[in-house]
Image: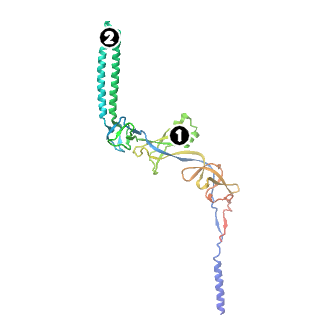
Amino acid sequence: MNKNYYSKWIFMICFVVGLGSCGPEMPKLTNSSFETMTVKKSDIELPYKFSARMKGQNDVTVTPQVSGQLMKICVTEGQKVKQGQTLFIIDSRNAQLELEAAQANLQAALAQENSAKLEYESNKNLFEKKIVSTYMLNNSENSYKQAQAAVAQARAAANRAKVNLGFCTITANVSGIIGEIPVRVGDQVSPMTQLTILSGNTTMYAEFSVTEAIVEAMVKEGVKATEVEKFIANLPPATFVMKNGTEYPHKGRVISLTGVVNTETGSLTCKVSFPNPEGHLYSGIQGTIVMPFAEKGVIIVPQFAVVRLQDKAQVYKVKADSTATAIDVTTEDTGNGKDFIVTSGLNEGDQIVTTGANNVTEGQKVLFSEAEKEVEVKVE
C-alpha cells in the first residue's frame, strides 16, 4: 500500500516536470527589417516612347486623269512593281477618236495657214509695185496671222488629245508595292476615283508628335534655330516596336523636326527614317517609336521606396534622431520598371527608407546602433 502511494507521487512529479518543459521558449535575437540609402545625383538613360504610323517614302495615290470605263487591271494587291510598269487600262476608244479629230483639224488649219501665207506674200509683191493698196496688204497680213493662231490652237488640241489618250494607260510613278484595289473591271472611273495606293517602301517614314522630350532636350542644350539640323543629326537612333511587341531589327534616324509648334496640341511633328531592305514594313503599320535620352544629374530612387497615398507620392526621410518622417515628392517614371526620378521633395545627401518603406509609421525609429540591432523578443 505504501509502495503504491509513493509510486503515485513520483508519477505526478514527473508529469509536472514534463509540463514545465513545454512552457514559453527562451528569448531569441532578431534584426531590424528596414534598409536605408543616401540620396545622390546620377545620370540615367530614359526610353521615351511615341505612338507612330509608318508611311512609305514615296506613297502615291493612283487616280485616273480621264473619265471612262476600266478595261483592265494589270496588277494585284501586294504586288511589287517597277517605275513605268502598267497598272490599269481605261477604255481609250473615245480618246482615240478625239485625237483623230484634233489631228484632222490641225491639217485643215495648216492648209488655211498656207493659203493665207500665199495671199499675203502675193499682195506684198503687188504693193511694192504699187498695184494694191495698203489696206489690202494689211488685210492679207492679218488673215495670215489669224491662220497662224488657228494652227497653234489646233496643234495644242491635238497634243491634248494625244496626252488624254496616254492617260488611258496608267503606269507606276515610282517603284513600290500595290495597296488595296477598291475598283473592278467594268467600273466607270473618273479623276475623283482612287484606284489604289502605290507605296515606295524601300525607305519608310514614321511620323509622330513630340510634346516634351525633344523640345525640352533642345531647350536644355540651348539649341538655336540655325542649329536644329545639327541637333537632329546628333539625336540617338530610334527603335520601332510593333503593336504585338516585336522590335524591328533596323534602327531609324530622325530626319526632320517641324520648326513650328502646333497651337492646338503644343507639339512638334517629328519624322524618323527606317531602311526597309526586306520589305517587312508597310504603309499604315502602327507602333511605338522608342528613343533613348540621357538625363544628367538627377535623383534616382527605387520604386519600392515610394509610398502611394491616393494622389500623393511620399518617401520616408530619416531625421537626425533616426526616426522617419513622410516627405511629399514628385516623380517621373524611368521606364525600366525599377526606379523613379524624384524631381522635387528630396535633396542630395538626404537619407531615406527603401526596403520596408510601406511598413514605416510617422516618427518610427528606423536606424539602430550596433547594440540596439539585437533586441529581445518574447513570444508568449
- Disc 1 crowd rating (10 Å Cα; few below 14, some 14-19, many 20+) is some
Q: Specify the quadrant of the image occupied by residue 61.
A: top left
Q: Specify the quadrant of the image occupied by residue 284.
A: top left
Asked if residue 70 is positioned above or below residue 2 in the image, the reply reads above
Q: Amino acid at mark 2?
A: Lys
Left or right of residue 58: residue 358: right
Kindly give the residue lying farthest to the top in the view shown: 130
Disc 2 element: helix
Q: Quadrant of the C terminus?
A: bottom right
- Disc 2 crowd rating (10 Å Cα; few below 14, some 14-19, many 20+) is many
Which residue was labeled with disc 2? Answer: 124
Which residue was labeled with disc 1? Answer: 268
Q: Quadrant of the N terminus?
A: bottom right
The residue at 30%/26% (across/down) is 103
**Camera-side residue: 92 or 215?**
92
The residue at 31%/27% (across/down) is 102
**Camera-side residue: 161 or 174?**
161
> Which one is earlier in the sequence, the residue at label 2 or at label 1?
2
Residue 12 at x, y = what percent? 65, 84
